[in-house]
Image (cartoon, helix red, strand yellow):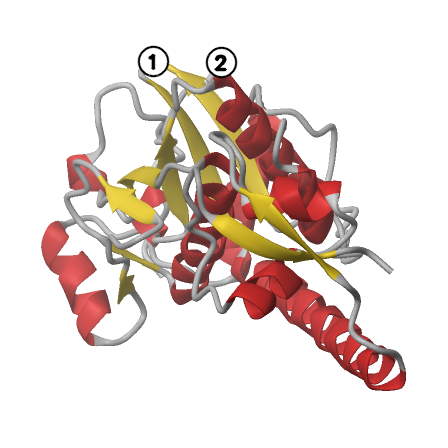
């Protein structure tokens, strides 16, 4: 492992519709007390220390040049993060990250898009020390591939959702996040082993819930449905909560492949048992 440089990305300064998504993220139960300390998005020296320590514990190299970044891509240590339905890359020179960070982006972007109706904009991923901006800290973990920057959205409700989610993940000890001011963005360092364990636990709980729901469904008749005409500003989350059902049930009942709905659309909404 190369010697870490002394720059960090950013200085120490720096739902209406979302409660369902936040509940999913709060189910982790995998807190790491040694990592989850004094949670906030203001940033601190202790937060930087935790990021650098995590990079060292994972034996991550601090990449110095773009050539080194591409060499790590060839070795499979970094993977490409691609733009898509839920995520946009803006001004990203090296669209690569540790596989666990790519998983984090995929999951967060999908939930953010469903909750806010806009794509998550990522502005930086792996960034070698030779390409660090002038205002970057000398202890930045961007050169390791374990960090990303997220654009500061103009939507107050989306900012509230995103900040709540980042704080929830911080409390679970799987990331460190800072709200940077100049320029405005969110810096997120993902702790790979901890994050993968977190996701595994969520998926096990989800599989248990699905199995339980399947048994309950087999034992009881399907709930009655109510036609519902989608209004401007609705999302599957808000409709499901208002009718005591779930997003998955709405998708299944209406043969929806994703969470996209539009004003004037008529949905069959199962009434909650």
Q: From what the image shows, is residue 53 above or below residue 211?
A: above
Residue at 37% across, 61% down = 98
The residue shown at (22%, 33%) is 132
Mark 1 lies on a secondary structure that is loop
Give whichever of 273, 168 is nearer the camera: 273
* The quarter of the displayed image where residue 117 is located: top left
Residue that sits furthest to the front in the current view = 227
Q: Is residue 177 visible?
A: yes
What residue is drawn where x is 39% and y is 23%? 152
Looking at the rendered image, the quarter that the N terminus falls into is bottom left
Task: Pick the residue in front: 85 or 131.
Answer: 85
Residue 147 place in picture, x, y as percent: 40, 45
CA gap, disc 1 to disc 2? 9 Å
90 left or right, relative to 158: left
Looking at the picture, how far across and down is residue 214, in whole percent? 77, 81
Quarter of the image where one finds residue 17: top right
The residue that mark 1 highlights is: 182
Residue to which mark 2 is pinned: 13
Image quadrant occupied by the C terminus? bottom right
| Badge 1 density bin: few <14, some 14–19, many ≥20, Cα 10 Å | few
Residue 194 image-quadrant placement: bottom right
Of the residues under marks 1 and 2, which one precedes in the sequence?
A: 2
Please report contact status of discs 1 and 2: CB closer than 8 Å, yes or no. yes
Q: Residue at x 77, y 55 (%)?
A: 271
- Of the pair 249 and 104, the residue shown nearer to us: 249
Observer able to see residue 169: no
């Amino acid at each position: 492992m190369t010697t870490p440089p002394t720059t960090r990305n950013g200085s120490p300064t720096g739902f209406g519709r979302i409660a369902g998504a936040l509940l999913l993220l709060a189910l982790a139960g995998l807190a790491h007390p040694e990592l989850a300390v004094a949670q906030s998005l203001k940033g601190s020296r202790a937060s930087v220390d935790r990021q650098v320590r995590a990079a060292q514990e994972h034996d991550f190299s601090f990449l110095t040049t773009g050539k080194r970044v591409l060499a790590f891509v060839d070795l499979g240590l970094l993977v490409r993060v691609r733009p898509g339905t839920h995520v946009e890359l803006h001004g990203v020179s090296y669209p690569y990250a540790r596989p666990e960070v790519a998983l984090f982006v995929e999951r967060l972007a999908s939930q953010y898009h469903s909750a806010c109706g806009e794509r998550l904009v990522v502005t930086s991923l792996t960034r070698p020390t030779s390409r660090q901006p002038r205002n970057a800290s000398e202890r930045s973990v961007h050169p390791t591939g374990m960090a990303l920057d997220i654009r500061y959205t103009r939507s107050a409700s989306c900012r509230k959702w995103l900040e709540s989610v980042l704080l929830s993940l911080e409390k679970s000890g799987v990331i460190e996040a800072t709200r940077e001011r100049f320029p405005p963005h969110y810096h997120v360092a993902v702790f790979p082993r901890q994050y993968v364990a977190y996701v595994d636990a969520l998926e096990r709980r989800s599989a248990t819930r699905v199995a339980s729901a399947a048994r309950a469904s087999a034992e009881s008749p399907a709930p009655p449905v109510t036609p519902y005409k989608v209004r401007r500003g609705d999302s599957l989350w808000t409709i499901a909560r208002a009718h005591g059902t779930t997003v998955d049930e709405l998708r299944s009942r209406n043969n929806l492949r994703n969470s996209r709905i539009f004003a004037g659309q008529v949905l069959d909404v199962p009434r909650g048992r």
